[in-house]
Image: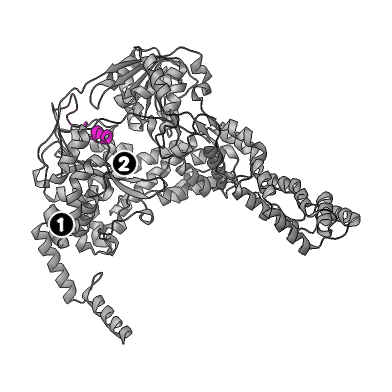
Amino acid sequence: MSRCAWSLLRRLARPAAAAASSSSASSGDGGASRAPDTSLFVPVPLKPGLGGAAEEDVGAELTRPLDKGEVLKNLNKFYKRKEIQRLGAENGLDARLFHQAFISFRKYIMESSSVSADLHIILNDICCGFVLPGHVDDLFPFFLRHAKQIFPMLDCMDDLRKISDLRLPPNWYPDARAIQRKIVFHAGPTNSGKTYHAIQRFLSAKSGIYCGPLKLLAHEIFQKSNDANVPCDLVTGEERVFANEDSRQAPHVACTIEMCSINTPYEVAVIDEIQMIRDPARGWAWTRALLGLCAEEIHVCGEPAAIDLVTELMYTTGEEVEVRNYERLTPLTVLDYALESLDNLRAGDCIVCFSKNDIYSVSRQIEARGLECAVIYGSLPPGTKLEQAKKFNDPDDPCKILVATDAIGMGLNLCIRRIIFNSIVKPTVNEKGEKEIDSITTSQALQIAGRAGRFGSSFKQGEVTTMHHDDLAQLREILSEPVPPVQAAGLHPTPEQIEMFAYHLPDATLSNLIDIFVSLSQVDGMYFVCNIDDFKFLADMIQHIPLNLRSRYVFCTAPLNRKEPFVCTTLLKFARQFSRNEPLTFDWLCRHTKWPLAAPKNIKELVHLEAVHDVFDLYLWLSYRFMDMFPDAALVRDIQKKLDDIIQIGVCNITKLIRASQSAAAPGTAEVVSEDFPLSRTQRDPRVVSERHGAASTEALSIAVEAAGLRRAKSGRSSRLGGRQEELKSYGRGSLANRLLREGLLTQEMLRQLESEWQDQHRNGRYGFGSKKDDQHSSKETRKKRK
């Protein structure tokens, strides 16, 4: 059976409501339109008395002034009429909108010094008994007119549904549909050579475009192409680099996927990491590239789990998919033993952590053993990541250990012998923005573990294990599970669609527009609407600033971490200055960031420097969209390179910064180190000791208890829950010290040291959280109350 025929059968059998994202609630069923979420409809306020004195004179002259007491009684009768509620529902007013519209209608009439003559006459006739009691229904046309004034979407609901109909994304790209494209899927695990073969075709073509998920990957292809004498430009959100000195566009371009042009024709296009089409936040960029690139050949690279979805998507465009499967080039072995202790580290080891605090803690413990380590985590600038990778890879450098987050999963070529998972649970953020702890997925585990034993490195095979013995069996099970197939591709409202919405709803805020759009949107079962929380966060933040809709939309799509207050504050200042039509100059930026900056003395200063680097990125990103308002991109790029060097100095001395942070701040590292998630929105495990209330001397205990809580986090996989039931049941048995000793999170020596320090504090009268002194005071208070 041909792949297209098989795709058709799967498509017919596929449930129409399939979805694969936190935003899947916004997915339609592909059929009849659903009722809108009216909780998103914000009423437009109407000021009373808009009719004017002239109209009041007409109404009063023809009848007499209204008795507001009688008017109120009859309006309440009107509201309670079942027939009126039914008529309201037929005109799009559900119970919520009907109630809001009536409250506004009643307030408008009662507070107005004048109403329109026709409404005045009807109200007077009803109040004076000139009509039958049932004729209170005659108010309905006036009520409906008022409802449509405060809820303008009622009058244009059909138009809004058409604008937000996302069921045929292939039709959005007529240039791509005008040509017959050849689709080649290079499928395989990490380190299988799939991207290498696609890039070889890219280099041999007369023209080509490479689309990758990271600036590092785009920069790598840019470098390789030009080294191979294939002129290639680099395009990212913050940077444009031309291969030709006269700034002529080269026939090849390497770009981050959001920046790919869907209007320029190419011979070959390469879309890397295609499985990210399911990403809840960025999946739309892969969908846009796959459906919209104008290239004779489209080479997609990624996990085999995406083959079926890509085939189905291409069936809707009339294009067949050729699949080329690849196997891993070097063997990867899951070891039978855990590392257990950092004393067992050897050259080429990489410890993978899932939080900055763990990175800091592990790196300090490694250097305390006289070993040098490199450090890589997500918020480091790309240049610093490359320098740390170069340091680790250099056979002549004494640095032979790497401590990293899952940021090493893609974008960096590393000579790793063994991957060691410090933990197999990872913090995530759910739909409500709350922190949750869950086991890493099979896809994530394979992506990270696959970095060991890279083909062409000094290590001919890779090894993977865990730090703790208890995690090893679960890791083995995770790696042995099949990767679930990618179910759906992401979509995102375009600026044009939002502009059309704004035309019909001119008084709505941008955040409200996007909410209504998603609420009304209808998508095919192969698609989902991407998460828009970051967009809405920025839209609400700058709503009070007077900007035109297109500029406001651009500011809201700026790539920034909303958990970084300094970066968010800077965007706000950028928008305010922009709204006043005042260019944001180099001098202004230097004053705001207090440039020049010194090398960091502690972790808090290092985190701030990383935030300043993000601010420079934000300036550069905006400079390519508003060149006249952000005119000093070249100068900013120069100081950003200098800042990169300063951050590198800090990362190289990271253990000294940690020690300085702990000695300078009594509350401990939790006050100094920026966590990956806001504490106020974190779901805490009550067993975990809060580092906010611990002294610096209890750091080891705090880290140990936190690690214990993380390692026992709910895995979300029913197949693994059974095996850990007994462990979870026995968690609360015995003292805290015994539990930590059994888990290997606390040694006898650490326990003796903590006991000694606690006794010293007790003798000196410095009582900790929940001390004997507090208990004695509490007991006295209790006895007084009983008396």
Any magenta on residue 456?
Answer: yes
80, above or below 775, in the image: above
User: Which tag, 1 or 2, sits closer to the chain's start?
Assistant: 2
Question: What residue sits right under mark 1 in the picture?
Answer: 740
Q: Is residue 62 above or below residue 635?
A: below
Q: Quarter of the image containing the N terminus? A: top left
Label 1 SS: helix
Q: On the image, which quarter does residue 689 sit in?
A: bottom left
- The x and y percentages for residue 483 are 28, 30
Viewer-proximal residue, 367 or 106?
106
Which residue sits at x=84%, y=59%?
A: 128
Q: Position of residue 412 (x, y in %)?
A: 27, 32
Q: Which mark is residue 378?
A: 2
Q: Which circle marks residue 181 in the picture?
A: none
Q: Looking at the picture, which amino acid does disc 2 mark?
A: Gly
The answer to which of 350 and 771 lies nearer the viewer is 771
Span of residues in magenta: 441-459
